Image: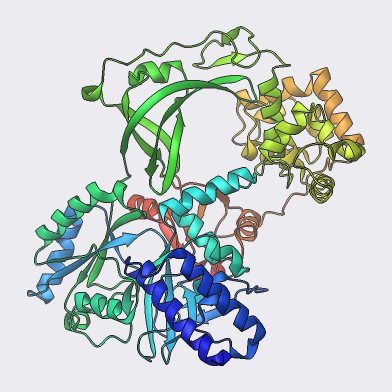
Amino acid sequence: MDAKTRIDELKEILNEASTAYYVNDKPIMEDYEYDRLMNELIDLENKNPDLVTPDSPTHRIGGEVLSKFEKVVHPAKMMSLADAFSFDELKEFDKRVKSVAPNATYLCELKIDGLSVSLRYVDGILKLGATRGNGSVGENITHNVKTIKSVPLKLKDNKTLEVRGEIFMPKESFIKLNMEREANEEELFANCRNAAAGSVRQLDSKVAASRNLDAFLYYNLDQNVKTQEEALLSMKAMGFKVNPLYKHANSIDEVIDYINEMGEKRPELPYDIDGIVIKVNEMELHDIIGNTVKYPKWAIAYKFPPEEVKTKLTDIVFQVGRTGVITPVAIFKPVFVQGSLISKATLHNEDYIKEKDIYINDMVIIHKAGDVIPEVVKPVEEDRGDDIKPFVMIDTCPSCGSKLKRLPGEADYYCLNDFCKEKLVNELIHFSSKPAYNIDSLGDKLTEQLFEGGFITDVASIFRLKDKISDLVLLPGLGEKSISKLIDAIEESKKNNLDQLLFGLGIRHVGAKASKLICKKFKNMDGIMQATLEELTNIPDIGDAIATSLVEYMHDENNISLINQLKELGLNMEYDGIEIKESYFTNKKCVLTGTLSSMGRDEAKKIIESLGGVLSGSVSKKTDILILGADPGSKYDKAKELGIYIMEEPEFLAKINE
């Protein structure tokens, strides 16, 4: 048999096996046999590169590396859906639909929490995979889409068409990925959606291939069918993976019953969902019902309320913060909440625990405050068993054994020992962290390792590590390349702006925002060290607590000595302030969500701040503008719920160019 014949035969066998396993969930081949045939195909293609075709399953391994993402214009706009947050809103949607199309029925589909994708096939071969982007223009991610095993590289017939759906990361893959990242001291992904979005935007397709992504398809632009249900069945027949948990509903009451049913099943699903999509099932009615500029009127997305999950609180442990504050932390059986596997949450302080009436071994309700921070909502008193234990606040530091002190007027207990090991380590971790001095390569675990080995004892000693290279190579896990990278990162960080240094010093009450305001006022470290209480409190948003803490810090002999050492070591002591211009954004509180196609998040932040705006990380009633990029997250939902002004990217660009 010649090479071409065998390659064609292997492609057909392997593609059929992939469809059976990843799409139909009915394996027809053992993993060992699949791997053996794949290795044979790889070997043949390596020997005959002219015989490699776009539908070869070897593309799923990855290997293509791009220098940048190309823009893709969508022939038909990828519209988003209007959201409903209550059943009353769904009933209003039903009234609007029935007023135009009284015989309409609905198809309900799970709203997968991933990112939208468009797939174009020419003569049955996958030619293009693209992100939604702003709806009109996305990015070419074909090299990464090909690594998703449930996406067919070749259709069963030779059709030319475009289908759309959702790329997602299964919960199991998410857990495995974060475990690997934690072991490598890399920043963890917040949830399944962020992990999927970060994976498909890798320039190296091998990275995407290693992430075990999946995809459900739900829309065919070229479909010649009468209903949405028929469309799903026809796509499944073509070899696309379609979510089987859809429901045909004859009334809005049946829709609501389905939502309640899926809401109960949600925690058990192997992937994350954040709602239910409701579409008019009859295709012929779509044009009659029509569209708005942004949304189709014949469809709506019901968004689940913040997810609450019940689990068992097995212990309460104590952490020592960099300021010495002692924080009780709840340890509970790991549960998935809004796309993240969580196993602990802060309980803040003794008063909080007593007020909530929380016992060890209680069943508790967990949710994410602001859709981000894990929080114990309340105990489930009716599930309280005989094994509960009352919480008892400790009176000595769990790290150094020093007597704790509760300061007047405060709920927190503090370790006042300046030489407490956990305090010192957390001070160093805070200093090098991304929000503070942002020393690349110096992660939490490495900081602890260097502290334990006596290589760093305070902030100044970080910048003396370059003198200890011959000793550093003896540490386990540190090779010459990683040490060189670390030293380079430390030297490069010396150029950081002064506000990063001030925040990094970990002065009580002096956060990132306060540091920036203080540096803008005094311009350099000498000015800050000489600042008076009156001068500081005259700065807007700088109160007595911040001012008093800063003045006390700057008059302490040990702190003065540390700052002088940092000066001698070459750290930047000047503030390179951005010139603030009067603009539409002046004094407005802005929040960014999603991905901007025209610039990165850091660039957008600098522009907003240079125009007098204030950038916040979360949406609240005080937010003035939500700047909307592609594939937005829960901030978008919160902004709509609060009636915050939502500014899309074209308007944002127009405003900053005025």
**Among all residues in the image, which is located at the extreme front?**
1
Q: Nearer the viewer, residue 638 or 621?
A: 638
Could you say which quadrant of the image residue 580 lies in?
bottom right
Q: Is residue 198 above or below residue 133?
A: above
Q: Residue at x 47, y 20 (%)?
A: 349
Percent from the top left, x then y, of residue 415?
Answer: 62, 14
Q: Residue at x 65, y 43 (%)?
A: 435
Q: How many marks?
A: 0
Q: Is residue 187 above or below residue 583?
A: above
* Relative to 532, 371 lies left or right: left
Q: Quadrant of the N terminus?
A: bottom right
Percent from the top left, x then y, of residue 23?
Answer: 35, 70
Q: Residue at x 62, y 40 (%)?
A: 513
Q: Is residue 68 above or below residue 470?
A: below
Q: Is residue 594 visible?
A: no
Q: Is residue 585 above or below residue 48?
A: above
Q: Nearer the viewer, residue 407 or 278?
A: 278
Q: Is residue 528 visible?
A: yes
Q: Nearer the viewer, residue 627 or 313?
A: 313
Q: How is the image coloured?
A: rainbow
Percent from the top left, x then y, of residue 352?
Answer: 41, 20
Q: Quadrant of the C terminus?
A: bottom right
Percent from the top left, x then y, of residue 258?
Answer: 17, 56
Q: Nearer the viewer, residue 244 or 382?
A: 244
Q: Residue at x 40, y 40 (%)?
A: 368
* Relative to 561, 263 lies left or right: left
